Image (cartoon, rainbow, N blue to C red):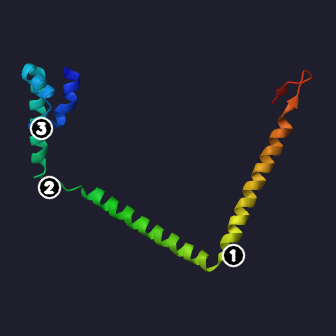
Amino acid sequence: MDCNEIREYLPAFDEQTYETAVMEHLQGCEECRTRLKQYRELGLEMGALSAYDVAPPQWLQAAIIETTLERLHRTAALRAASRRLGEHPGVAAGGALLLAGVAGAAILVKGRHHRKRVELTPAGAVTG
């Protein structure tokens, strides 16, 4: 195995689950051994970070709480509106039909507008 292949194993390397080819390479390659040592030191340093209690800044806490409350209120309002529509199924069906009609009319108008702009040249080529 070459250094590029070995480097894929180094971040999670563990002697308990090693491959023979990796161990053989590490015995003969100072650069890869140095990288392995750096990964292990980094892992120890990162593990030490778990002892620190880092609180978010007050402005961030306030922003999270405010945003969460806004979303809860918005969700509650949408659920209430949905329940009201559920009580009057005719209103919901009428709204859906109205929306479908508007969409269909828009498609027809756009199609007519597009057909009017297309002209045939004397040679029979389409322009516009």
Q: Which residue is mark 2?
A: 53
x, y percent for residue 66: 36, 64
Q: Where's residue 36, x and y in %?
A: 12, 30
Q: Amino acid at mark 3?
A: Asp
Q: Is residue 99 left or right of residue 37?
A: right
Q: Amino acid at mark 1?
A: Gly
**Which of the 4 image quadrants contains residue 121?**
top right
Quadrant in the picture for the N terminus:
top left
Image quadrant holding the C terminus, namely top right
Q: Give the mark nearer the N terminus: 1 vs 2.
A: 2
Q: Relative to 79, does residue 29 appear above or below in the rendering?
A: above
Q: CA distance from mark 3 to mark 1?
A: 67 Å
- Residue placed at 13% from the left, 43% from the top? 46
* In this view, the mark in front (1 or 2): 1
Is disc 1 surrounded by few (<14), some (14 to 19) or many (20+) residues within 10 Å? few
Residue found at the far front of this picture: 20
Q: CA distance from mark 2 to mark 3?
A: 29 Å
Comes first in the chain, label 2 or label 3: 3
Residue bearing mark 1 = 90
Q: Which residue is mark 3?
A: 14
Question: Mark 1: which secondary structure?
Answer: helix
Residue depth check, mark 2 versus mark 3: number of the one nearer the observer: 3
Q: Is 56 or 42 nearer to us in this picture?
A: 42
